[in-house]
Image (cartoon, rainbow, N blue to C red):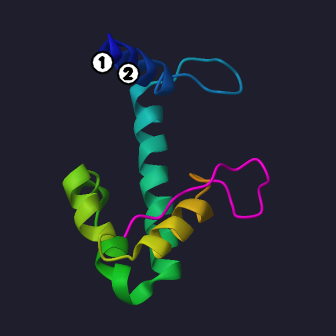
């Protein structure tokens, strides 16, 4: 049952619609959205950590979009650097957000 609920959640989270207009997105529009997100990650990584993340930032998207490739590249960052990157990309709330849940750092 839990697995089914997770699959249902994943389906609706990645539902292929424009959040503002409600119009269906084509496959090309979804692919462009995916590429834009990866490129944003690459730019932020290079801007914040040019020495550590140069290879990642200059790689083509096809070479880094898998989980294993992302893990290999992002493992070069310390946990605090990863946390700062996630906050910069607005994946996690910033420190000043009073509604933000506490995020434990595991060493």
Residue 99, horizontal then vertical, whole percent = 76, 47
Is residue 55 found left or right of 36 in the rendered image?
left
Residue 94, horizontal then vertical, whole percent = 69, 61
User: Which structural element holds mark 1?
Assistant: helix
Up-down relation of residue 8 to residue 29 (above or below): above
The quadrant of the image that shows the N terminus is top left
For label 2, the residue is 6
Is residue 97 found left or right of 106 in the rendered image?
right
The residue that appears at 45% across and 33% down in the rendered structure is 30
- Mark 1–mark 2 Cα distance, whole angstroms, equals 5 Å
- What's the mark number on residue 106? none
41, 61: nearer the viewer: 41
- Count residues near mark 2 (Cα–Cα under 10 Å), then give few for <14, some for 14-19, many for 20+: few
- Count residues near mark 1 (Cα–Cα under 10 Å), then give few for <14, some for 14-19, many for 20+: few
10, 33: nearer the viewer: 10
Residue 18, horizontal then vertical, whole percent = 61, 26
The quadrant of the image that shows the C terminus is bottom left
Please tell me in which quadrant of the rendered image residue 31 appears: top left
- What's the mark number on residue 3? 1
The residue that appears at 48% across and 21% down in the rendered structure is 15
Q: How many marks?
A: 2
77, 26: nearer the viewer: 77
The residue that appears at 56% across and 70% down in the rendered structure is 84
- Tell whether position 100 is magenta: yes
User: Which structural element holds mark 2?
Assistant: helix
Kindly report the secondary structure that dominates the magenta region of the rendered protein: loop
Q: Which residues are magenta?
A: 93-107
- Tell whether position 82 is magenta: no
Q: Are marks 1 and 2 in contact (CB under 8 Å)?
A: yes
Please tell me in which quadrant of the rendered image residue 32 appears: top left
Is residue 97 found left or right of 1 in the rendered image?
right
């Amino acid at each position: 049952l839990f697995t089914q609920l997770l699959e249902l959640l994943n389906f609706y989270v990645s539902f292929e619609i424009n959040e503002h207009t409600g119009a269906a997105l084509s496959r090309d529009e979804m692919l462009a959205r995916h590429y834009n997100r990866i490129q944003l990650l690459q730019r932020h990584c290079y801007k914040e950590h040019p020495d550590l993340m140069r290879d990642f930032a200059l790689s083509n998207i096809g070479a880094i979009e898998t989980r294993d490739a992302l893990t290999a590249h992002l493992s070069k960052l310390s946990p605090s650097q990863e946390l700062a990157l996630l906050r910069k990309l607005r994946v996690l709330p910033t420190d000043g957000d009073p509604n933000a849940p506490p995020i434990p750092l595991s060493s």
